[in-house]
Amino acid sequence: MSLADLFRRTRIDTTPLRTSRDFRLLFVGGAVSYLGSMITFVALPYQLKQLTGSFLQVGALGAVEVVPLVVCGLWGGALADALDRRRVVLATEFAFTMLSVGLVVNAMLAKPRVWPLYAFGFVVAALGGLQRPSLEAMVPRIVAPDQQGAAAALASVRGTIGSLLGPAIGGLLVATAGPATAYAVDVVSFAFSLACLALMRATPPPPDATTPSLRSIAEGIGYAWSRKDLLGTYVIDLSAMFFAFPFALFPFIAADFHAVWALGLLYTAPELGSLVMSLTSGWSNRVHHHGRAIVYAAFIWGSAIGLLWVAHDIWVVLVLLCIAGGADMVSALFRMQMWNQTIPDELRGRLAGIELLSYSVGPSLGQTRSGVVARYAGLRASLGSGGVSCCIATVLLAISLPALWAYDVRTSPEAAARRKQAHTLEGLATPGFELNAS
């Protein structure tokens, strides 16, 4: 096989960008908006540190986000199945914009207040929980079923680039122009995103859409429980993040290797691995056993983190983190394909709310676990035990959930039903819905 053939087989599939106008708008608007949000992600704790000088108060920013994220994530899923998903995203995006305007005003005061920063974190978490299910549930309506993997890879590239560039730009802005300027850039990014969303077609709910309620949320949870292959995608990722999420230990790793200069690289390495895997994700279109790919990826993630236990060079650490980030991206690609290719449209929002919790709660709990184990058993023991536990848990979960291991998109009845439903839903969309463009 020539190098040109290898490139064609592995390069990222950009078909959704070419065939779906709405996906292009969502992609571009989301890219700009996420970049702005990552700038604020840096500016907010920086300003709080300036105002308080307290490690505890800066750390409390994360604590105020947990409850609204959990509550609003589940409710946001119910809203996504009952309302026009584009309108939900538009409304929450406008609210994000107004919150950023409030940050600009507060930062420009002679004596900026501290409480608005915590209020911002709380409300942003709530809005994120309301928005994310509708945002994710829009994709199956604007992208053909056989292009869901490509759409997931493109979204991953967008997010990874934003995670790499946003903090760098944010750090430069707060250091040279101050937090107010950084927040103002975020306001502009939201305005651009709003314009893109306004140009998109409506995504109305089915005529028999379920009214948002606790009962409808329970119905979504019941569906997830009944689908053991689907349940496996949640618990394996939750397990991997709980046992082997090392980010809280990065400052200690840098100190242990006498390489404080590498602290930024430790955070960047997993993102780099993720970006490389996304850009070369063309091969994923030829994989049909998505569940097995998720299991293998989780095992590789745990193995890479576990090997940090015996690494004796900072460059080996960085390579292992790149491998871990790439494996995590593979897991994310196939999880998203399974979700978007098999979940009925009328339940997609509620299941997206459950998914939000599965990939948000794991890292939070994982940071706590890694910190506690490191406190009582040491840094290396925390990394090694976490990685080994992740691998063991992955194997046990794969054995106990054979439906995940056996899943094949070619023979899955849920995937076949979703493909049929996707064509039926064309009648609900306004002109310009390009599902058949493939």
Image: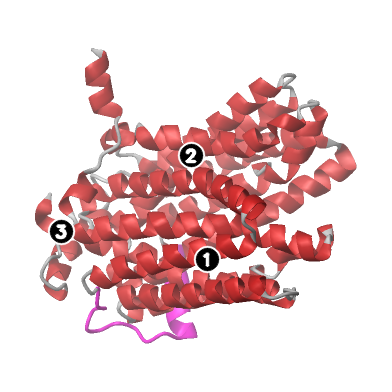
Q: Is residue 306 above or below residue 339?
A: above
Left-right relation of 47 to 279: right
Question: Does residue 228 appear in this view?
Answer: yes
Which dot, 1 or 2, sits closer to the camera? Answer: 1
Q: Residue at x 62, y 27 (%)?
A: 318
Report the span colored magenta: 203-224
- Which residue is disc 3 drawn over? 435
Label 1 environment density (alpha carbons within 10 Å; few <14, some 14–19, many ≥20): many
**Residue 184 numbered mark, or none:** 1
Q: Secondary structure at mark 1?
A: helix
In this view of the protein, which residue sits in the foreground, 395 or 207? 207
- Which residue is disc 2 drawn over? 295
Which dot, 3 or 2, sits closer to the camera? Answer: 3
The image quarter containing residue 208 is bottom left
Mark nearer the N terminus (3 vs 2): 2
Judged from this view, the residue extending furthest toward the top is 2
Mark nearer the N terminus (3 vs 1): 1
* Residue type at tag 3: Leu
Label 2 environment density (alpha carbons within 10 Å; few <14, some 14–19, many ≥20): many
In this view of the protein, which residue sits in the foreground, 343 or 132? 132
